[in-house]
């Protein structure tokens, strides 16, 4: 059961990990005088935000009888369809709002204040971007519901959620690892990563949301047909 629960969350976790805006945010933090403290603080906040939201949704899903004697409850399949539709709408919005070819997308205004962030504020930003970001919230809800419907033991469900959180943290976590392990070369790599993410943000988000939306819709429709 543990393997099944973990298998259910992998695609959702990758979707959370590939988040251009949080990755750009942590790269900008690492370039500030407080980079050595703000970068790890951001990751700590991210881990907490993702863990808290994931736990809340998982407990709610488990408490709502996500499984029956014959398999996953019908409501979980409808939830997948609903989440799939919402992610499809996010994909459309991202594509329609894409910048001109070769141009960087306009970054959120709060990023202009990153130079003045304290470790506490960096941790708060990480928690919010991990748990409240609409795309991540949808993916976390999908992952938690998928775990609950396996009917696995509480320990197996907790293990699957932990895997989800760890993989979901790789996106913003890798730049921090580069910063601390590559020295001067890392600065160049991170600058290129920031530029590339800025240019391709809309395309990345569109494809990512569309693919996961298709998976959710397919799984939900298939589950209702059984």
Image (cartoon, rainbow, N blue to C red):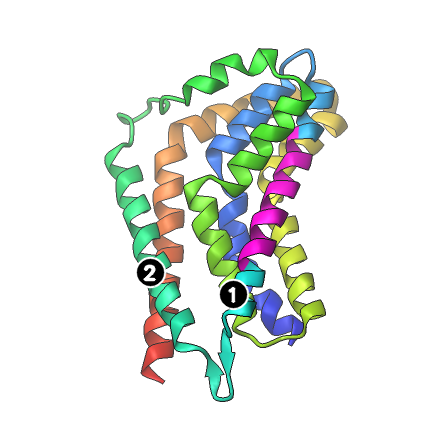
Could you tell me residue 179's position as x and y percent?
69, 26
Q: Bounds of the magenta span? A: 42-57
User: Circle 1 is placed at which residue position?
Assistant: 61
| Numbered disc in front, either 1 or 2 | 1
**Residue at (58, 62) in percent of width and height:** 59
**Residue at (48, 13) in percent of width and height:** 112
On screen, residue 142 versus residue 94, left or right, reads right
Q: How many residues crowd around disc 2 within 10 Å: few (fewer than 14), some, or many (20 or more)?
A: some
Was residue 60 drawn as part of the magenta stretch in this picture?
A: no
Outermost residue, front direction?
63
Quick check: can you spot residue 101?
yes
Q: How many marks?
A: 2
Magenta residues, dominant SS class: helix
Image height of 167 relative to 191, above or below: below
Q: How many residues crowd around disc 1 within 10 Å: few (fewer than 14), some, or many (20 or more)?
A: many
The numbered mark at residue 82 is: 2
Image height of 23 relative to 210, above or below: above
Could you tell me residue 77's position as x and y percent?
38, 71
Task: Report which quarter residue 30 is drawn in.
Answer: top right
């Amino acid at each position: 059961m543990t393997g099944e629960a973990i298998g259910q969350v992998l695609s959702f976790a990758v979707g959370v990990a590939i988040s251009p805006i949080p990755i750009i945010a942590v790269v900008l933090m690492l370039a500030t005088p407080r980079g050595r403290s703000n970068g790890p603080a951001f990751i700590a906040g991210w881990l907490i935000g993702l863990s808290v939201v994931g736990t809340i949704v998982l407990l709610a899903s488990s408490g709502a009888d996500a499984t029956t004697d014959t398999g996953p409850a019908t409501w979980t399949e409808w939830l997948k369809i609903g989440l799939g539709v919402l992610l499809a709408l996010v994909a459309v919005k991202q594509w329609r709002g894409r910048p001109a070819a070769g141009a960087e997308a306009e970054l959120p205004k709060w990023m202009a204040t990153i130079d003045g962030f304290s470790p506490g504020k960096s941790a708060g930003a990480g928690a919010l971007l991990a748990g409240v970001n609409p795309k991540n919230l949808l993916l976390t809800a999908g992952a938690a519901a998928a775990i609950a419907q396996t009917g696995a033991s509480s320990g197996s469900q907790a293990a699957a959620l932990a895997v989800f959180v760890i993989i979901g943290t790789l996106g913003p976590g890798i730049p921090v690892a580069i910063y601390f392990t590559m020295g001067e070369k890392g600065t160049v790599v991170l600058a290129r990563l920031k530029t590339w993410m800025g240019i391709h943000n809309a395309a990345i988000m569109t494809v990512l949301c569309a693919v996961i939306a298709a998976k959710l819709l397919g799984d939900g429709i298939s589950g209702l047909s059984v």
